Amino acid sequence: MSSPEVATVPPAYRDLLSKKGFAHVATVGAEGEPQTQPMWYEWDGTSILLSHTKARQKFRNLTRDPRVAVCILDPDNPYHYLEIRGVVEIEERSRTEAHRSPVQEVKRQGSLPNHKPGDERVIIRIRPTRVNTYGD
Amino acid sequence: MSSPEVATVPPAYRDLLSKKGFAHVATVGAEGEPQTQPMWYEWDGTSILLSHTKARQKFRNLTRDPRVAVCILDPDNPYHYLEIRGVVEIEERSRTEAHRSPVQEVKRQGSLPNHKPGDERVIIRIRPTRVNTYGD
């Protein structure tokens, strides 16, 4: 398993965390196979936050194995990127709270893509345990 | 393990395969943990091709577990994307051949990012076994 220690993001890469881009989030499935998907994200100063429904495969993967790898590419310079590995904690919130998630508010796009009325949403909190940086 | 069957990419998503973007490539490490990284890619009509050095973690991961998940996001519309899962075959080529890889030639950016003289390069061929599409 990954170390439970907390890793920090070097100052030269912190701008990436507030850019309006996507995090490519890799998890591991029931048979140990990789899965990956783009997601909106927010950085709250110590963790990456994702908003997710309980119905999808990534949620099932993360309840089974909380290890995750996230790639955040600078939308203005694809040779400047971060890979953050971490362990997730899933925060149950009421549907209303999660629907108005910080992820949604930061992105300010009105509504989450693919959100359907009645979806049960959770906040996935990723505490970095390792940070790899690429580019200048 | 994934099915060895070959999956096809629906026509509405084939344009993504020839765009000049990045593939986010997820693999699984020695302890079953996910890893992810952006890479240039080429589509040869049946497979995704990546050019990679033997020295890096992703290569070691893939020689241990050939299962991979690749996300290709439309650079012009991030809500239009593909997730391709597959099994890799690693093609050994001479250093000169791999350096002039099809991936490099398609991207026409002169040289591969992070390429160092003396790097031993291989071609990673991904045959899709499952294709998930998102957006219209």
Image (cartoon, coloured by chain):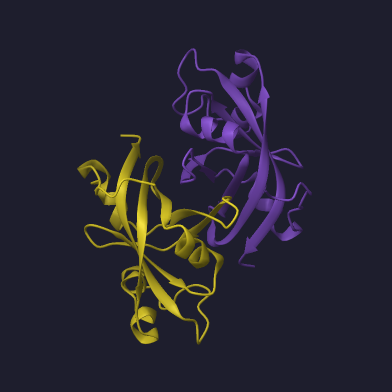
Chain colours: A yellow, B purple
Does residue A9 lie above or below B136 as drawn?
above
Q: Left or right of A63: which side holds B1?
A: right
Q: Nearer the viewer, residue A110 or B27?
A: B27
Q: Left or right of B116: which side holds B5?
A: right
The residue drawn where x is 48% and y is 38% is B30
- Answer yes or no: is residue A74 visible: no
Does residue A134 lie above or below A44 as drawn?
above
Q: Left or right of A117: which side holds A122?
A: left
Does residue A32 lie above or below A105 as drawn?
above
Q: What is the x, y in percent for residue B87?
A: 67, 42
Q: Nearer the viewer, residue B11 or A87?
A: A87
Q: What is the x, y in percent for residue B14?
A: 71, 52
The residue drawn where x is 49% and y is 67% is A59
Q: Quadrant of residue B68?
A: top right
User: How many numbered circles are shown?
Assistant: 0
Does residue A127 lie above or below B38 as drawn?
below
Report the quarter where the C terminus of chain A lies. top left
Q: What is the x, y in percent for residue B85?
A: 64, 50
Q: Nearer the viewer, residue B50 or B69?
A: B69
Q: Left or right of A77: which side holds A7?
A: left
Q: What is the x, y in percent for residue B62?
A: 58, 35
- Answer yes or no: is residue B75 visible: yes
